[in-house]
Amino acid sequence: MTTLANRIQYLAESETLAMSRKSRELKAEGHDVINLSLGEPDFNTPDYIKIAAKEGIDKNFTFYPPVAGYEDLRKAICTKLKRDNNLDYESNQIVVSTGAKQSIANVMLSLVNPGDEVLVPAPYWVSYREIIKVAEGKSVFIPATIENNFKITPQQLEAAITPRTRVLIYSSPCNPTGSVYTREELKGIANVMAKHPEITIIADEIYEHINFIGKHESICQFGFIKDKVVLVNGVSKGFAMTGWRIGFIAAPIAIAKACDKLQGQFTSGASSIAQRAALKAFITSPDATPDMKIMQQAFRERRDLMLKLLAEIPGMKVNHPDGAFYIFPDISWYFGKSDGKTTISNSNDLCMYLLKKVFVALVPGDAFGDPRCIRFSYATSTDKLTEAVRRIKTALLDLK
């Protein structure tokens, strides 16, 4: 009998992928499932990017690429960071990986020793916790409440730091809450971190271009801590390129070299053709193509629709997300209620109740560090969103 390693036995399945799998199974049985569980834009990759990928094939970019990515792509990322974010990086500070998820794993494995503590504002993206487990670190969760728009304060951050703290990781715009840290809020965090130079910040900015309040703000803009920040970004969300699997880090040279070394033993370079597509994405200014603006406007309209529809459901407490494409309402009002067959004890119960009763797939808040909430992804059509909320409202009215 095969005995699996402890690390894989302790590792949880991604709850978002698990819920998506359950919805596919129900669809295969013939049910009309509306899947609001996956964080994936429902837009096609822009044509100008697809053309660049085809050109890459025709020009025979079919051999092993450099581990850290093609030099012209890394230079293009530096240009993008200067153009869009006013940040200065050299190409040797950039490492391109197979998605931002691998970028985060590379950094965590390069920095965290067994028993080291990683600060994680909660709610958080599901994979942070599990990646920290693989690195044998200890997650220290800092709870942010819906009343504070799911954002932590500098005082909370300071109180969570111990001599074992090695890393702080957060996302803005945030998955799952859609919250966006302002420049002033980030400066407050930067001021705390400046007092602790032994701690590295991982700033997950993958939702940079899905931002409804104007200019994206990065903590890297504060020069007094920039040498302790790893910026993580990619093409999946802002360019509708989830399947292309391209992410990157912009990091202090020592960390970039460590990630290059680690990645060289795991996956080597990311897909050569996907890199050619990403190059076109990054060298094109967001102002030069309508695709990004069209997608962002569609997400804004869907957010506004969802806020209006969810406000009509009794007991559902909703914040006002300023980015990404998620809403993360507090549904604890329904705990203890029953339709006579099913009693709702937690967010997982409520999600399974809605999936089985009205075939709407959501993700329980436990997966993101807040068991009082559930996550809606509104990365789908307004017709499907309207129908999904109608079904949910009907099902919840049966709970007494």
Image (spheres, rainbow, N blue to C red):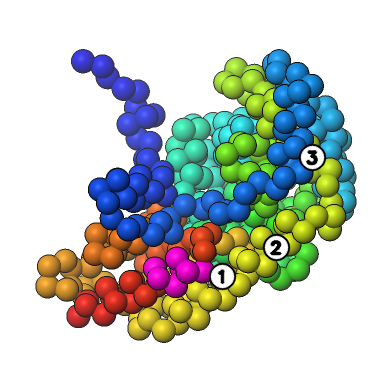
- Quarter of the image with the N terminus is top left
Residue 192 versus residue 275 in the image, above or below: below
The amino acid sitting under disc 1 is Arg
Residue at 87% in and 51% down: 83
- Of residues 247 and 262, the one nearer the viewer is 247
Check if mark 3's residue and mark 2's residue have beta carbons within 8 Å. no
Q: Within the magenta stretch, is there residue 239?
A: no
Question: Circle 2 sits on which residue?
Answer: 294
What residue range appears in magenta?
382-388
Disc 3 crowd rating (10 Å Cα; few below 14, some 14-19, many 20+) is some
The amino acid sitting under disc 2 is Ile
The earlier-in-sequence mark between 3 and 1 is: 3
Residue 192 versus residue 8 in the image, above or below: below
- Of residues 389 and 178, the one nearer the viewer is 389
Q: Is residue 231 visible?
A: no
Compute the Cα span from label 1 to label 2.
Answer: 12 Å
- Of residues 343 and 24, the one nearer the viewer is 24
Name the spot of residue 99 as percent of width and height, x first: 61, 37
Task: State which quadrant residue 375 falls in.
Answer: bottom left
Q: Main secondary structure of the magenta part?
A: helix
Check if mark 1's residue and mark 2's residue have beta carbons within 8 Å. no
Task: State which quadrant residue 96 falls in.
Answer: top right
Q: What secondary structure is found at the residue carrying circle 3?
A: helix
Q: What secondary structure is found at the residue carrying circle 2?
A: helix
Residue at 68% in and 43% down: 234
Disc 1 crowd rating (10 Å Cα; few below 14, some 14-19, many 20+) is many
Residue at 39% in and 48% down: 20
- Quarter of the image with the C terminus is bottom left
Residue 32 versus residue 99 in the image, above or below: below
Question: Circle 1 sits on which residue?
Answer: 302
Question: Circle 3 sits on which residue?
Answer: 280
Horizontal relation, residue 389 to residue 61: left or right? left
